[in-house]
Amino acid sequence: MTVAEGVRPEVDARSLSDADVLAIRADFPILADEGLVYLDTGATSQKPRAVLDAERQYLEHENAAVHRGAHRLAAEATERFEDARATVAGFIGADEDEVCWTGNATGALNTIAYAIGNASAGRGGREADRFRLGPGDEIVTTELEHHANLIPWQELAARTGATLRFVPIDDSGALRMAEAARIIGPATRIVAFSHVSNVLGGVLPVDELVALARDAGALTVLDACQSVPHLPFDVRALGVDFAAFSGHKMLGPTGIGALYGRRELLNALPPFLHGGSMITTVTMERAEYLPAPQRFEAGTQPVAQAVGLAAAVRYLEGIGMARVAAHEAQLGARLAKGIAAIDGVRLLGPAPGEPRIGLASFVVEGVHAHDVGQFLDDRGIAVRVGHHCTQPLHRRLGITASTRASAGVYTTRQEIDLLLDGVRDAVGFFGVRA
């Protein structure tokens, strides 16, 4: 029995004990390496046996093309595929037909942007008129976005003649909400923003941004990559129109992501990719398309990956997302407090004591992030270095790169302390002066 199978999802919000975390770690084969301190979960998470076994079981016993075969194996594969969709939809509070499979969150965000671009080019008929953009319309994002939630909107603006605007941040990395209220207005058609910054670790004020967008009659697009794996998440409660997240960041496989969209919006959007499995009728002159989610799932689908992602969701539900969030918030607080206390090191994002997930980025003054990362790697501590696909954010903060430590449900308090010891030693090794 895995830990997730042995814990009821309705457990209370108390944090995980050290014994709980050690039991969880036993479910992750890669963490059996005693020399590894894995603090790069924000980039990609490790996978429990339940996920590895689910993929293997499917491939060994049920592998077939879904939605297109009359034989028993195809029917079983289709059932597993759609059961996975139902599992993931339930995890985020959506209906099954509101979750479309994509290759990753980047693919999901591009799907929305390109579908709106197709509508703006006159595709989709009268139903798609609500999405059409042109000169005078505005797309609003923020200064702290991952490139995947910035470049698609740059491209959409370039194709349609719309104007791209952004909500700036202050010196601490917090959104300047007074500016947001000024920028989001009658011309705004789309507001795209992250739920949690992948660099700063702080949670954005989703309710305020959604309210501003709704008052302006604009659509909201949420990059939920760093929230779905770490926080209780409900699209209905958040009130967003679209959301994107990746499987590999939430204990699931690579090559699978999901696009959530409100049913009436998905069914009004023209598709982005075209081909088999997303049509009703095709002639030599034209085609008619299935409703969502199939209209956004052209071609062969990532079936084994979807099955694995469903297993990851069940694993997280077995622990309880409230407990996951509480545990990781404690780790984030420990990270922030420890890093801020080291002379010569600059903590990015929320100050110690302010809410954050289990993620913290920092700069060792006068030392390139890659050198810090190599120093830590020599001690078996895996962290992320670079601009983390957020060059505008780093530029605004006056830096070119940072070092990021990101925890998961399997991370121990002792691993955080090893990271802090390593940073202190790096400061001494490189001769940093405060």
Image (cartoon, rainbow, N blue to C red):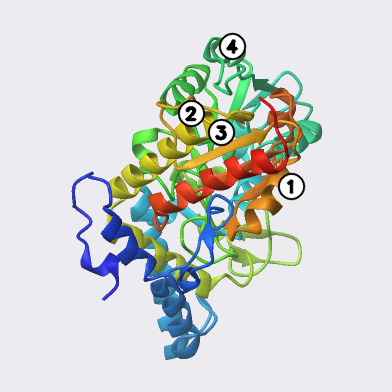
Q: Are circles 4 and 1 on residues that touch, CB within 8 Å?
A: no
Which residue is nearer to you in this view: 162 or 392? Answer: 392
Image quarter for residue 103? bottom right
Residue 17: image location, x then y, percent: 26, 53
**Mark on residue 370?**
1
Q: Earlier in the sequence, mark 4 or mark 1?
A: 4
Q: Three-letter amino acid code at disc 4?
A: Glu
The tally of labels here is: 4
Gap in angstroms between the C-alphas marked 4 and 2: 15 Å
Q: Earlier in the sequence, mark 4 or mark 2?
A: 4
- Report crowding for label 1: few under 14, some 14 to 19, many 20 or more residues within 10 A (C-alpha): some
The residue where tag 3 is placed is 200
Which residue is nearer to you in this view: 150 or 239? Answer: 150
Point 66% across, 39% down: residue:
428
**Mark on residue 204?**
2
Point 55% across, 28% down: residue:
349
